[in-house]
Amino acid sequence: MPTKQNSTQKNHEEETLQLHKEELKISKKWVETADVTVYQNTYTEEKQILVPITREELIIEKKIVNPKGATDAQIETIRIPLSEERIEVTLHPIVLEDVEIYKKQFEELIHINETVREEKVQIDTFGDLKVIGDGQSSPK
């Protein structure tokens, strides 16, 4: 905007123009674009396995013979358990996979297009005027 200043020493009006120019100022700031929670879940599964076991028994068979000559004999069996296999279940963990979690910064170039304005003085003349600028002489 032009501002007018009156000079008391000179009898002419003086005008001052302020010319402006826009300049680009680039700044950056961090913003959160996502929130990530990393966790592990444990799932359970029932397993059914058939395991054969062995046991050892002492077997005593008694045959009672009929002393009167009968052909039928009676058999009496006694079983005494001596030892057996017992099932022992142990769980031991094994590593399935290693999962690494870390942050890494990547840099990329982003092309920015912006329009800036600049004010320049323009002088329009009317009539038969001779304009003399710095370093120029008046045409003859």
Image (cartoon, rainbow, N blue to C red):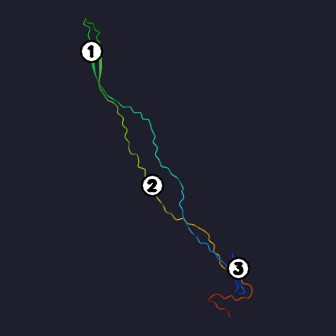
Q: Type of residue at label 1?
A: Lys
Q: Type of residue at label 2?
A: Tyr
Label at residue 4? 3
* Dot 3 or dot 1, earlier in sequence: 3
Which of the 4 image quadrants contains residue 77?
top left
Foreground pick, 89 / 9: 9
Q: Determine the residue positioned at 29% across, 21% down.
A: 80
Mark 3 vs mark 1, CA separation in Å: 139 Å
Please state the horizontal and vertical placement of residue 24, each as a whole percent of the image. Answer: 58, 70
Please state the horizontal and vertical placement of residue 50, each as a whole percent of the image. Answer: 38, 31
Q: Secondary structure at mark 2?
A: loop
Please name the residue that numbered disc 1 is placed on.
Answer: 62
Image quarter of the C terminus: bottom right
Tags 2 and 3 in contact by the CB under 8 Å rule? no
Q: Residues within 10 Å of mark 1 (few under 14, many from 20)?
A: few
Q: Nearer the viewer, mark 3 or mark 1?
A: 3
Mark 2 vs mark 1, CA separation in Å: 78 Å
